[in-house]
Image (cartoon, rainbow, N blue to C red):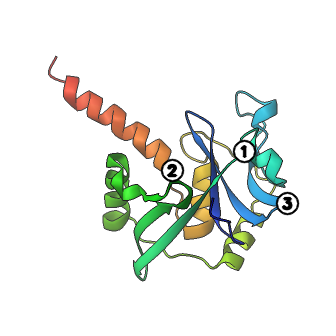
Amino acid sequence: MIEPQYGDVICVNHGIYNHFGIFVDKSHVIHYSGKEKDMFFREMVIDETDMENFLGGSDKYYVYKFSEDKPSNVSRIRAEGLGRDLIDDVQALYILYKIKNKIKFKLYTPEETVKRARSRVGERKFLLHANNCEHFAVWCKTGVKQSYQVNAVIKAVFVKYLIYEDY
């Protein structure tokens, strides 16, 4: 497993979804917390917690690295723990196309990323489709609220609709 650095976006797989946060150190992660107490996400709050709370019973997590090909553009997103570029994934191709062609953003330094994350500690505006843990973590790093998981679901529904619309 790649060791995370200060300000990295990290993610833990929980089966049907990935949970995201901003790594501060081995004892601190900033993320939407509270799921273990609230199945319906009504009490979710951005909090700086320990790694155990972030992992939620899992024993491993992944470091997401964003690399720039030119200013204000992201060329690839790599899940280091998975050992492959996400561009290999068909869903990721769609998402990266949207990012490269429509959404421009920069990468914040680790210090700026953590400062941005800490500026939202205490926030209780969780929305699964529009302001979830992934939106939060990607925003901290890039300034853009983006959830690749939500986009994949939207794409899957869109593709299904196109396939069955004639019936």
Q: Position of residue 78 (x, y in %)?
A: 48, 62
Gap in angstroms between the C-alphas marked 1 and 2:
23 Å
- Label 3 sits on residue: 27
State the residue lying farthest toward the top: 167
Q: Position of residue 157 (x, y in %)?
A: 35, 32
Residue at image position (82%, 60%) is 28
Q: Residues within 10 Å of mark 1 (few under 14, many from 20)?
A: few
Q: Quadrant of residue 22?
A: bottom right
Q: Residues within 10 Å of mark 3 (few under 14, many from 20)?
A: few
- Label 1 sits on residue: 59
Gap in angstroms between the C-alphas marked 3 and 1:
14 Å
Task: Please determine whether, in this image, residue 77 is positioned above or below residue 158.
Answer: below
- Label 2 sits on residue: 147
Residue at image position (48%, 43%) is 150
Q: Earlier in the sequence, mark 3 or mark 1?
A: 3
Mark 2–mark 3 CB contact (< 8 Å): no
Task: Please determine whether, in this image, residue 27 is positioned above or below residue 12.
Answer: below
Task: Report helix, strand or loop for mark 2.
Answer: loop
Q: Say which quadrant the C terminus sits in.
A: top left
Task: Report helix, strand or loop for mark 1.
Answer: loop
Q: Amino acid at mark 3?
A: Ser
